[in-house]
Image (cartoon, rainbow, N blue to C red):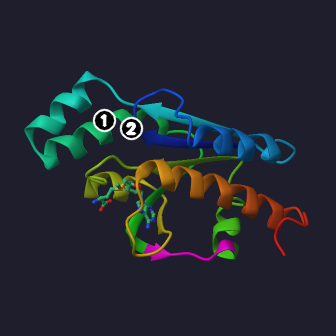
Amino acid sequence: MKINVIIIDKKGKDQLYTPLIEHYKKIAKPFAKVEVIELFDKEIAKAHDISPEAAKKSYTKAFEKYLSNGINIALDPSSKEVDSFDFANLLKDSTTVNFYIGGAYGFEKDFLTKCNKAVSFGKITLSHKLVKLVLLEQIFRGLSINNNHPYHK
Ligand SMILES: C[S@@+](CC[C@H](N)C(=O)[O-])C[C@H]1O[C@@H](n2cnc3c(N)ncnc32)[C@H](O)[C@@H]1O
């Protein structure tokens, strides 16, 4: 199966999170190919200087081309909270699963309605880099649950 983590973020490897992200991608390999897709362009940078609404619109524009393939799940703090078993079930719905992590201003409502689901990791707001790491760990945990791997005890 293919899992895409699509995030509004500048490309580039930071020393802090990248080794762990790569670790989870590697250990998930027997079950799924996990790819992290970072999106940030001049249009998003410019929109940030205009208004939160313009910024959210620019995120939607960047995300939209990925919506056509597979199941689409937005990570949104104010949506339905999931536990690790609910999360594992999301990975059973399709052979391609796209997860979306919003930018500094979250998502446009319109984008959330275009996704199949929106889920929350709790009411706290995590930085997008930290959310990416938590998501990668939960993807591996979910794959472990679905494949009876002993990681999830
Ligand atoms: C810095 S946060 C943006 C905060 C923004 N004010 C909002 O309400 O979404 C960047 C992204 O991280 C993700 N995120 C942060 N905390 C989260 C949580 N508790 N559960 C799910 N996703 C979260 C969301 O995708 C969010 O758009």
Q: What's the magenta region? A: 80-84
Q: Give yes or no for residue 125 being in the magenta stretch.
A: no
Dot 1: element: helix
Residue pictured at 40% horizontal, 75% vertical:
123
Q: Residues within 10 Å of mark 1 (few under 14, many from 20)?
A: few
The number of numbered discs placed on residues in the rendered structure image is 2
Label 2 C-beta lies within 8 Å of the nearest ligand 1 atom: no
> The C terminus is located in which quarter?
bottom right
Circles 1 and 2, Cβ within 8 Å, touching? The answer is: yes
Residue under label 2: 64
Residue type, label 1: Lys
Q: Choose top left, top right, bottom left or bottom right for residue 74.
A: bottom left
Kindly identify the residue that appears in the image at 40 percent across and 54 percent down.
127
Q: Nearer the viewer, residue 4 or 38?
A: 38
In the image, what residue occupies the spot 64% across and 43% down?
21
Q: Residues within 10 Å of mark 2 (few under 14, many from 20)?
A: few
Using residue 19 as the reference point, say whether residue 12 is left or right of it.
left
Q: Residue 14 or 46: which is nearer the viewer?
A: 14
Residue at x 10%, y 44% (from the top left corner): 51
Q: Which three-letter amino acid code belongs to the residue tagged 2?
A: Glu
Residue 61, numbered circle: 1
Q: Is residue 86 left or right of residue 123?
A: right
Q: Against 96, is 40 above or below?
A: above
